[in-house]
Image: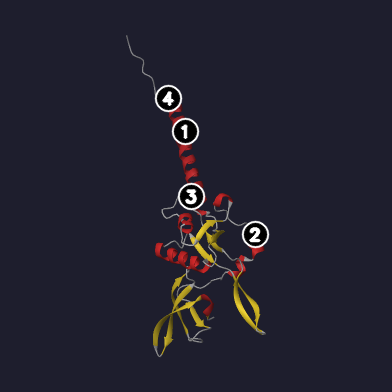
Amino acid sequence: MSDELRMPDDSLNEDESSKETGENVSETEDTASQKEKETKKEEPKWYVVHTYSGYENKVKANIEKIIENRGMQDQIHEVCVPMQEVVEIKNGQRKVVQRKVFPGYVLLKMYINKEAYVDSWYVVRNTRGVTSFVGPGSEPVPLTDEEVRAMGIENYTQTFDFEIDDHVRVISGPFVDFEGVISEINPSKKTVIVRLSMLGRETPAEFDYKQIEKVI
C-alpha cells in the first residue's frame, strides 16, 4: 500500500501571507493614527477658581511658586488676577488706583490632567486660599472662547515673544536704556534674566516682561 504524496498548497500560503501583511498594515496605520492624535495636543484652556476675599494675589503667588518648584510650566501656563486703573476722588483730589476686575477670583490658563503624576487640578484646588473651581459641583469647566472674549481676559494678560539670546533694551526702571542679552526666562513669574553690558562687564539682572523690548 503506497502513501500518496501531496504537494504543498501554495494558494494557502499566499492567503496566509496576504492576511499577515494586511494585519501588519492595519497595525501600522493604527500606530500612525495614535501618534497623530498625540501630536495634535489641545491648547490649554482658561479656568476660574474662587478664593477667599482679599486672597487673590496671595493665591496667584502661591500657585506660581508651586509651578516653579514642581516644574509644572507645561501644565499651568498662566495665572492671572485681572486689574484695571480707576480714578478715585478723595478730599477733592483725583487719584488713579488699581482695582481687581473680578474680586474673589483667579484665572488660570492650564491643562486639567488628573492622570498626570502631578495632578494640576489637585495642586490648584489645594492651594491655600482657594475655595473651589467655578463649575457644576465645583468641577473645573473651561471658559468658552466667547466667554474669554466677553470678559476681555486676553487683554489683561501679557504677551511674550522673547527667546534666549535675544538682544534687548531696558525701557523702565533704574537700568533704563541699558542693553543686554536674555540668558534665562521664567514664564511662571513673567521675568527674564538679562546679561547687561556695564563698564565693560556683563552683569545679570532680573526684569519683568514689560520692562524690556527687542533691539532690532
Front: mark 2 or 1:
2
Query: Label 1: how many residues lie within 10 Å, few (<14), some (14-19) or many (20+)?
Result: few
Mark 4 — residue? 9
In three-dimensional space, the C-alpha distance between marks 4 and 1, rounded to whole angstroms, equals 16 Å
Q: Secondary structure at mark 2?
A: helix
Q: Residue at x 48, y 57 (%)?
A: 125
User: Which residue appears farthest toward the left when viewing the image?
Assistant: 1
Q: Looking at the image, is mark 4 or mark 2 earlier in the sequence?
A: 4
Q: Residue at x 48, y 37 (%)?
A: 22
- Residue type at mark 1: give it: Lys
Q: Is residue 165 left or right of residue 171?
A: left
Query: Label 2: how many residues lie within 10 Å, few (<14), some (14-19) or many (20+)?
Result: few
In the rendered image, is residue 60 in sight? yes
> Could you say which is closer to the camera, residue 191 or residue 129?
129
In three-dimensional space, the C-alpha distance between marks 4 and 3, rounded to whole angstroms, equals 40 Å
Q: Looking at the image, is mark 4 or mark 1 earlier in the sequence?
A: 4
Q: Which mark, residue 19?
A: 1
Quarter of the picture holding the C terminus: bottom right
Q: Secondary structure at mark 4?
A: loop
Front: mark 2 or 3:
2
- Residue type at mark 2: give it: Glu
